Amino acid sequence: MNASSARRIKGLVAAGAVAVSALALVGCADSGSATSPSASASAGSGDSDLDAALAAVEAPLDAYPVPTEAVDGIDAFKGETVYYVPVTLQSPQFSIVSAQLTEALETVGISVQVCDGKGNPSDIGSCIGQGTQAGAAAIVTDAVPYGLAANALDAAQAAGIPVVISNQIPDDSHPASETLGYVPAGGSDQEIAIAQWITKDSGGTANILINRTADGPSQKAYVQAGTDELDEICPDCTYTINDVSSSNFPQVTPSVSAALLNDPTIGYVVNDFAQFLQPTQGGVQAAGMMESVKGVTGSAGIGALQALASNTYLYAATGQANAYQGWVEADLALRLMTGSTVPEYTIPVRLFTRENIGDVTLTEEAEASGEWFGPTTFREDFEALWGVA
């Protein structure tokens, strides 16, 4: 590891320490970056910095980064409805977010109408249009790029309906405004943590196959953050990008198998999203490389973490705090609805490995509570901001 790489990782660790200190003062913290289960060799002179960065993201938070400024004027919206439009409810994470968004808004007397985008632009646009026609108090989309439904989103705002774009990078051509807000995703942080774990685990000499979801610009940006990290801290690592997509799901298994057979020296296979975990493992099995490849995935939920605990294919997985995200989406919607100040939000991520997975309660209830990432008291913290007795 070169000097600039060590400085970069040291900076990440320092930033995490500052966030934790700030948390003690104002109730706000940030997430860090990742740790390894079974490091096979030293990654170089910056090894201690890498260890510290990994340790920061492997541990749960002391507290969630809840905003501190109260929201006024919510009572005027009691009895109204917020529309929630996830890109597809086939992904379990959106069911969790949906349930938590509903629970959060119910505390202030606002209901939620869920409309499944079904991964189809026409269905997504139709859902947003339904919300506009119904005079929704706000429309919250999840993992939907603005450009995928630009006409419908423009029409909603023109009708005076605030729009929340969640789980996407901000669209420069549609910046945040009084009627548009963004909830950041943890995708880039997850990919950076994966890059750090692989660097440590491989001793800085990994050959990696990366399944990159090609469904939109945000997914590509997340993987780019991970490969940028590899380029910085692991100059002797090599990687191959294998583009996969939800619309071409049956091709995931043969494409993974073909890539591995083309380069049998590949030692790590990474998914940016756990929805591709099963067909990816099938590709590894088809290539006869289950004994030589270490599986890693991002966006892990209960299924992926149970697979990690089984000690079969997965060695590490990252996830983001989906339960907390539902409350953040509610907070942003309420702030846009009432014209309140919009803060900077952070969705925490965590790295799970074969070493720490035994300390995690692997139940749907635990996942929905948010306890995997920190104390579950964030609900009461938000309620206090919203004036809930």
Image: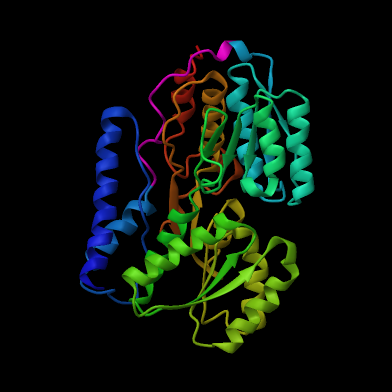
The magenta-colored residue range is 60-75
Residue 191: percent from left, percent from top: 46, 60
Magenta segment's dominant SS is: loop
The answer to whether any part of residue 297 appears in the image is yes
- Residue occupying image coordinates x 46% and y 33%: 376
From this view, report whether residue 59 is shown above or below residue 202.
above
Q: Is residue 247 left or right of residue 333?
A: right
**In-front residue for pair 45/37:** 45
Q: Quadrant of the N terminus?
A: bottom left
Residue 79: percent from left, percent from top: 69, 14
Q: Quadrant of residue 330?
A: top right
Magenta segment includes 371: no
- Residue occupying image coordinates x 23% and y 65%: 6
Q: Is residue 289 left or right of residue 359?
A: right
- Residue occupying image coordinates x 74% and y 62%: 247
**In-front residue for pair 181/222:** 181
**In-front residue for pair 358/244:** 244
Residue 83: percent from left, percent from top: 69, 31
Q: Is residue 347 left or right of residue 127?
A: left
